[in-house]
Image (cartoon, rainbow, N blue to C red):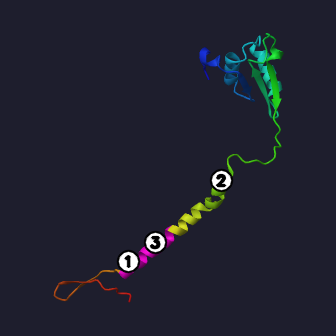
Amino acid sequence: MDMPPDLRSQVDVVFQLRDNIQSSRRKTWEQFFGFFDTYAQFAKTMDATTENYECLVYDSKASKSNKIEDSVFWYKANPNLPAFRVGRQIFWDLHEQYYCDKEDENEMKMLMEKNEKENEMRKKNTRVVKATNDGQTVVNWQNQYD
């Protein structure tokens, strides 16, 4: 996660969630939270603010002061959100109409039906090849199952 300074300066808000990988935490501190005096201070703050659905928030435009408490906050998400849907109702209607959670089973059934039809067609157009006593080949295109 090495972000060049010109791109990093375009970031206004950083939401940092819990991260157990020390190298990632250090990069986050170096890239966005360098105003903490030490990495240990940042790590302690991050540990305190990123557990139990919480996150550390840095808003670079929130304050004109240099005080950490004016631009660093924490947020706790509500894990018990009511049910909701994303997208227009027309897409959900199409989903209800065409989605089949037994898709593999239905596909297998369709393939078996197709194979049965093909076998029936082959039976109707079976070519009967016989050899006579004198070695001649006789081909009969009539249906042998009639």
Q: Which of 62 and 69 is in front in this view?
A: 62
- Indicate yes or no whether the magenta region holds residue 117: yes
Disc 3 target residue: 115
Give whichever of discs 3 and 1 has the lower sequence position: 3
Q: Which of 70 and 50 is in front in this view?
A: 70
Majority SS type along the magenta span: helix
Residue 121 in percent (x, y) is at: 40, 77
Magenta part of the chain: 111-124
| Label 1 Cα crowd, 10 Å radius (few <14 / some 14-19 / many 20+) | few
Instruction: Determine whether 98 is above or below 109 in the image.
Output: above
Quadrant holding the C terminus? bottom left
**Residue located 34% across and 80% down the image:** 125
Disc 1 target residue: 122
Disc 2 target residue: 90
Secondary structure at badge 1 equals helix
Quadrant holding the N terminus? top right
**Residue located 80% across and 20% down the image:** 72
Secondary structure at badge 2 equals helix
Label 3 to label 1, Cα distance in Å?
Answer: 10 Å
Q: Which residue type does callout 2 highlight?
A: Ile
Q: In which quarter of the image is residue 78?
A: top right
Q: Nearer the viewer, residue 68 or 93?
A: 93
**Residue located 45% across and 75% down the image:** 117
